């Protein structure tokens, strides 16, 4: 074989490889470290089976699906949110789909904004199970309103719930983990903890605050390397988040919540969360395209990110003002109200 032919073959292989990687990236739904861990890391089935996992926001959406998948792995569960009857429903389903027994699941109603109750709640979990291996800070609410129209009380409420409620519970659980020299603290942030979007200034601020806090806490825990801190950043995922979002006033509900169909399946998001938890990944992005690409652009080319956000943001605001669901039309052509 001549040298020319050999070089041509090598070049063709290299181009094919690059092409394959581009196709893989176009279909990716997680960042590179996460997908690498999914491909060759420790599997959730091996790591999480016998653990005691406390999940906040377990009555709906991502938290609900998370406890279903954890129950199938055999983890013992503490289910928290404000609504006891919804938690009982979730508990019954866990018992139905897994081999867990009544004593393996503790229903513990808890309001994240009622910080005075967090210490007592932690003691109840320790009395019941004797240990907490993983705390999943998942409970939270989003926002759909422009800053200029939004009462400051809404900003206070979002920070009380998403930020202060989360760090308050973490403060109660951490001493126990330090004493046991073991534990994982997992926080469900958002890609809006890294990037920005109009109509969610308070929500993005609360999620950015969580990143600043947990990244700093991880630095403080250098003397306790056995405790891991994982920040999960999902893009749009099917749940009740839009339905439950804050609006211009604390007690006002959103009128048009739109379709959830185009969003990532909750089960896939949760599977990737479990991979991140099993592998103690520090930060993961879980999002389908084009949201995943937006994360990379925000990370590596912030000025371009601003350019793209201003174009898409304008459309999002227009849709919202026209009474359409802003979220579902973010990357879609502007539709008429009558569509
Ligand atoms: N779905 C998405 O597209 C998406 C994207 C990025 C990040 N996230 C994050 O994922 C997490 C879960 O949201 P989700 O999408 O599953 O929404 P969801 O279906 O609305 O669930 C939110 C959960 O939080 C609980 N919660 C709300 N207020 C609470 C309070 N004061 N105290 C305790 N629990 C409270 C709710 O239960 P009760 O009402 O019964 O209290 C519910 O179980 C949130 O932190 C959210 O920011 C979601």
Image (cartoon, helix red, strand yellow):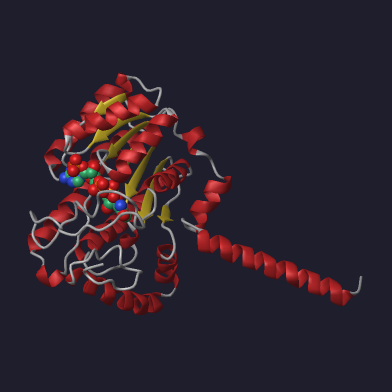
Percent from the top left, x then y, of residue 329?
A: 30, 67
- Residue in the foreground of this view, choosing between 242 and 294: 242
For residue 14, which quarter of the picture? bottom right
As drawn, which residue projects farthest toward the right?
1
Residue at the spot 35% in from the left edge and 45% down from the top edge: 186
* 15 in relation to 274, above or below: below
For residue 118, which quarter of the picture? top left
146 lies left or right of 212:
left
* 208 in relation to 61, above or below: below
Percent from the top left, x then y, of residue 34?
A: 49, 52
Residue at the spot 47% in from the left edge and 58% down from the top edge: 31
Q: Is residue 238 visible?
A: yes
* 323 in relation to 274, above or below: below
Screen quadrant of the C terminus: bottom left
Residue at the spot 18% in from the left edge and 31% down from the top edge: 85
- Residue in the foreground of this view, choosing between 160 and 11: 11
- Residue in the foreground of this view, choosing between 269 and 283: 269
231 lies left or right of 56:
right
Percent from the top left, x then y, of residue 233?
A: 36, 55
As drawn, which residue projects farthest toward the front?
338
- Residue in the foreground of this view, choosing between 127 and 332: 332
Residue at the spot 14% in from the left edge and 45% down from the top edge: 113
Percent from the top left, x then y, of residue 1?
A: 92, 70
4 lies left or right of 233:
right
How many marks on residues? 0
Q: Is residue 167 visible?
A: no
């Amino acid at each position: 074989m001549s040298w020319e032919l050999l070089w041509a073959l090598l070049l063709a292989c290299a181009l094919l490889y690059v092409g394959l990687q581009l196709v893989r990236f176009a279909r990716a739904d997680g960042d590179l470290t996460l997908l690498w861990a999914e491909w060759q890391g420790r599997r959730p089935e091996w790591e999480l089976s016998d653990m005691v996992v406390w999940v906040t926001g377990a009555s709906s959406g991502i938290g609900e699906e998370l406890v279903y998948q954890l129950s199938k792995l055999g983890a013992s569960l503490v289910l928290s949110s404000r609504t006891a009857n919804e938690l009982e429903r979730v508990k019954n389903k866990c018992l139905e789909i897994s081999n867990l027994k009544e004593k393996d699941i503790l229903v513990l109603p808890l309001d994240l904004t009622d910080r005075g109750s967090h210490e007592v709640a932690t003691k109840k979990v320790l009395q019941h199970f004797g240990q907490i291996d993983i705390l999943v800070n998942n409970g939270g609410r989003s926002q759909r309103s422009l800053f200029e129209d939004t009462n400051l009380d809404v900003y206070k409420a979002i920070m009380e719930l998403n930020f202060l409620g989360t760090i308050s519970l973490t403060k109660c659980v951490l001493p126990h983990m330090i004493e046991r020299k073991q534990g994982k603290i997992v926080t469900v942030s958002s890609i809006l903890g890294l990037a920005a979007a109009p109509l969610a200034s308070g929500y993005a601020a609360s999620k950015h605050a969580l990143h600043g806090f947990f990244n700093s806490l991880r630095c403080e825990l250098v003397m306790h390397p056995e405790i891991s801190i994982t920040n999960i950043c999902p893009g749009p995922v099917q749940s009740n988040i839009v339905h439950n979002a804050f609006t211009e006033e604390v007690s006002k509900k959103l009128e048009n919540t739109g379709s959830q169909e185009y969003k990532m399946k909750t089960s896939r998001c949760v599977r990737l969360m479990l991979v991140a938890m099993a592998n103690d990944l520090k930060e993961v992005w879980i999002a389908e395209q084009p949201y995943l690409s937006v994360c990379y652009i925000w990370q590596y080319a912030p000025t371009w990110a601003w350019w793209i956000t201003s174009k898409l943001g304008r459309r999002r605001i227009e849709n919202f003002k026209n009474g359409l669901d802003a979220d579902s039309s973010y990357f879609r052509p502007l539709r008429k109200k009558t569509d």
